[in-house]
Image: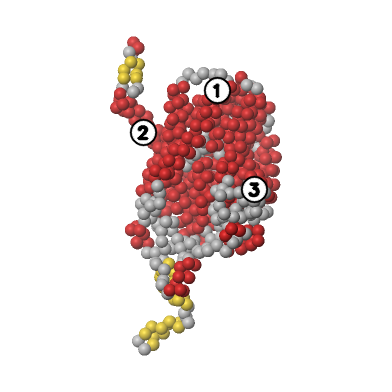
Amino acid sequence: MAELEQRGGERVRLGLRGTMRLLMPYFREKFLDQVKTIWFIILYLLAFQLLVLGMPLVYAAMIAVGVFLVALGLMFFMEGLRLGLMPLGEIIGAILPRNANLGVILGFAFLLGLGATFAEPAIAVLKAAGAGVSPLQAPLLYSLLNDFAGQLVFCVGAGVGVAVLLGVLRFFYGWSLKILLYPLIGLLTVLTIWVASNPVMAPVIGLAWDCGAVTTGPVTVPLVIALGIGVCRIVGGEDSGNAGFGIVTLASLFPIIAVLLLALTHFYTDNYYGAANFSGENPALSDVGLNTEALGLEQAAQSVDEVEAGGISKQEFQHYVATGELPEGVHLHYEGGTVEWSNGRIVHRDAAVVYERVEDPSLWSADVDEWDPESNFFDEARSAVLAALQAIVPLCAFLFFTLFVILRERLKRLDEMAVGIGFAVVGMFLFGLGIEMGLTPLGTQLGSNIPSSFASIQPWGMEGSIGPLISTGFSGKALVMLFGFFLGYGATLAEPALNALGDTVQKITAGAFRKNLLMQSVALGVALGITLGVVKVIYNIPLAYLIIPPYLLLMVLTKVSSEEFVNFAWDSAGVTTGPITVPLVLSMGLGIGATVPGVIDGFGILALASVGPILTVLTVGLIVRRTSEVAEKGVPDE
């Protein structure tokens, strides 16, 4: 029961009802704040499926519950960060650089980056992304996402840890971000080209580059920035408020390197699905009569019983040949030939008799399930609880150990921090459950259905086929590109982190780079990036062709830009990867990739959505600087 202290020191017990009455307005406000964050992207996706594609929403009730849990989970999680994790990070960030030597600080920085990565909500989406990957088409990618998922997440966390460590060293020695970016982008270019040169390794590129976007979320960014500010205050930085810039960029680049190196290691040790030294739980391809080295990836893929989405499968065809029984939901029509009237009969001569599976859209509403019949709520809730505890508890234990044992400091508001940590665990649990029930099926469903604008597909979760909605192939694909553009633009402007970044940049540049201009630049960059990502998936373009040229161009723009513009431009990519955007865009991309014929996976959209805002912000920054210089030269001397 809560107590309040009146004047004179007298305490008043509120009771459960009074406590709830006192807290409800507070929680209502915080819940509505999260609803304001996610309403646009959810409403946009629903409107596109229902109004543009004209398809009903499968598992609508389950998705509605999931979205509610996401908003509720984010409310608790963000409050937990504010009350528990953030104060811990800020206290340690202020005390550690003053009371410990450089070696201890660097060790703490590495472990902080590693632990924060495990606590990122989007990591759960990354772990579940391997379900739709074919082991025959992409054996190495399949193995990393399924058999070696633990190694994958650890490498991502280790990459963030190295990035935070290097970021602290940068603050200590005053290194420019530019001198770190050149070798990093050079190494990434070489590794990407190397991996792209081999058909077994090439599908891993999209996963690796997307991992860089997943890491810069609501846990990692505040904690590492708090540490960076603390270090800069001790080493005498001129502007400790600018200390966090640059470290987020490093935290998004090193995980890419780590995942690419992990892929190279498994490939050259023959430790992946179908290879000689495979150590995973699934049977090797040779055990089922297939071998990727003997057949080659293309032949192995052709040996799978593939069928165009929405069509009649090979098994159904064989059953028809053997029994004469047609599959359910087929429609007969004739192609070619001539039609005659003969002896009171209509005769089709020299015509092909074609059976196709079709579905009457008017019947969909009666056939669509409101809840996934295979979903077990209690099993999913149990898994979400365990995942939340595994993510939050080790990180908090590490922070408390550092504070109490290494720094020997006491906390004044330990009870408040305990409540915050409890909120973080509850929030992570609700958020993870909401992703599983709401965001993942919503994103995957829409991604799977979007190709109906230019191809005949089987709608997600339904029988039969539909499409193409637009007879002209390019017009249908252009509609998908337009969808991606407005999705990126609107979702980015709704990110609260972008609003905070705009205030900071306007302050740092003394108003030269205005808040609204930065927000529009970032949103435009994300929109163009997601559009390019959609193009990559629907045309099955290798990601290396699309990701390397922009980064090489960024090297040129970075060279000619000032240090302050380089810092916040590169960090602007971090605001595009919020806890809502990442799972939705990732699942949507995988859904598109699973539907478009010939596409192995849908990774890469997040990576292109991250490089886009860096390009636009650096470009606009150069224009702003040029305009300011011209204005200054035009002012006559007094």
Local SS, label 3: helix
Residue 90 on image: x %, y %: 54, 25
In 3D space, how far apart are the residues under numbered discs 3 and 2 (Cα atoms)?
A: 49 Å
Vertical position of residue 488 compared to residue 454: above or below: above
Kind of residue at badge 2 = Arg
| Pointer 3 local density, CA inside 10 Å: few below 14, some 14–19, many at least 20 | some
Residue 65 on image: x %, y %: 37, 44
Q: 95 or 339, which is in the foreground?
A: 95
Q: Residue at x 46, y 49 (%)?
A: 443
Mark 2 or 1: the one toward you = 1
Q: Residue at x 53, y 63 (%)?
A: 306
For disc 2, the marked residue is 28
Whether residue 567 appears in this view of the structure is: no
Q: Which mark is residue 75?
A: none
| Pointer 2 local density, CA inside 10 Å: few below 14, some 14–19, many at least 20 | few
Q: In the picture provided, is 73 more to the left or to the right than 597?
A: left
Vertical position of residue 567 compared to residue 125: above or below: above
In 3D space, how far apart are the residues under numbered discs 2 and 1 (Cα atoms)?
A: 34 Å
- Quarter holding the C terminus? top right
For disc 1, the marked residue is 403
Residue 133 on image: x %, y %: 54, 53
Q: Residue at x 49, y 50 (%)?
A: 588
Q: Residue furthest bottom?
A: 343
Residue 404 on image: x %, y %: 54, 21
